[in-house]
Amino acid sequence: MQLGTRAACLCLLAGVALGCGEAETAREIRADPEAAFQRLEEDLLAAPAARVSYAITAQGVYDASLTGVLLIGAGNALRLEASGSFAGEPVDAVLVSNGVGLSMTVGGEEILLETPGQLREAVVIGLTRMGLLHNLARLTGSAPPDHAGGAVTKWVKVSDFSIADPPEAPPVDGVPVEFGIVLSQEPVGEVIMWLDQRTGLPMLRTQTVHFPDGDMLVTEAYHEVDLQAEPTAAAFTLN
């Protein structure tokens, strides 16, 4: 076999292998969406560091338009930024934890607290199970993430996993995993989370959340989910 022909065959085989690898992740998600969701949570909790950039819109009981970034470092080092609007009010907020102390600055006003013992878990589980908007709404009121002191996984659960029927024009090239949100043992919402076919990481989340006075429709786009991120120490430095 001539060198050129051999190289072409090797390239073809490599392409086939890569395609099979990508398809395998998608097949695993479709075969067991609940297990794929559990792996996602485990990977986010175990990652040495992570970066998530997001854009969120909501309509209904509460309207929102927020963009920002979530940075996760070692231990309980964390930074959550948000700008835009929520419930008709402008938002310019940042939460920073160096693992010992926590600062929340909202509209130029700063509050200092001790870092809650399970801050990272509360933010990660809040993101995966309820969506990031829940804890962003708390931040706009200068409140730390829900259940950052512990027991977040007992408080909010997920149920009834399936693969959703995709629309004719899917918004992203992912696998649509559908599930319900259960808060304090009460169903409160329905979610479709689009998982990347190659990595299993979230790309897009659409959900309906039920309140006593009406529903809220939320879309969270995750433009970047990087579990190999290397945030600088300055990102977690308090003022």
Image (cartoon, rainbow, N blue to C red):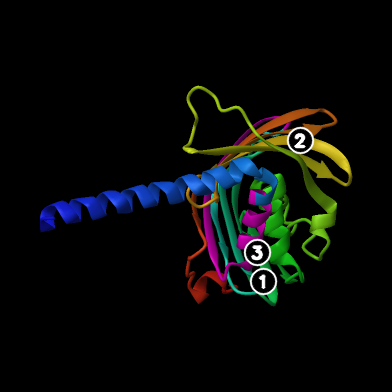
Q: Is residue 112 left or right of residue 187?
A: left
Disc 3 and disc 2 in contact, CB within 8 angstroms = no
Q: Which mark is residue 189?
A: 2
Helix, strand or loop status at disc 3: helix
Q: In the image, which is nearer the foreground, mark 2 or mark 1?
A: 2
Q: Nearer the viewer, residue 147 or 204?
A: 204
Marks 2 and 1 sit apart, C-alpha to C-alpha, by 29 Å
Q: Nearer the viewer, residue 136 or 48?
A: 48
Q: Which mark is residue 45?
A: 3
Ranked by sequence position, the earlier of labels 3 and 2 is 3
Helix, strand or loop status at disc 2: strand
Disc 1 and disc 3 in contact, CB within 8 angstroms = no
Question: Given the current orientation, which residue lies at the most extreme front position?
Answer: 1
Q: Is residue 140 visible?
A: no
Q: Which residues are magenta?
A: 36-61
Marks 3 and 2 sit apart, C-alpha to C-alpha, by 24 Å
Q: Residue at x 50, y 22 (%)?
A: 168
Position of 157 relative to 44 (above/below) = above
Q: Is residue 215 left or right of residue 230?
A: right
Position of 219 relative to 48 (above/below) = above
State which quadrant residue 108 falls in: bottom right
The residue to which callout 1 is attached is 76
Ranked by sequence position, the earlier of labels 2 and 1 is 1
Q: Residue at x 55, y 51 (%)?
A: 201
Queried whether the magenta region covers residue 105, the answer comes back as no
Q: Residue at x 68, y 58 (%)?
A: 123
In percent of width and height, residue 109 lies at 65, 60
In percent of width and height, residue 157 lies at 80, 48
Q: Amino acid at mark 1?
A: Asn
Q: Residue at x 60, y 47 (%)?
A: 91
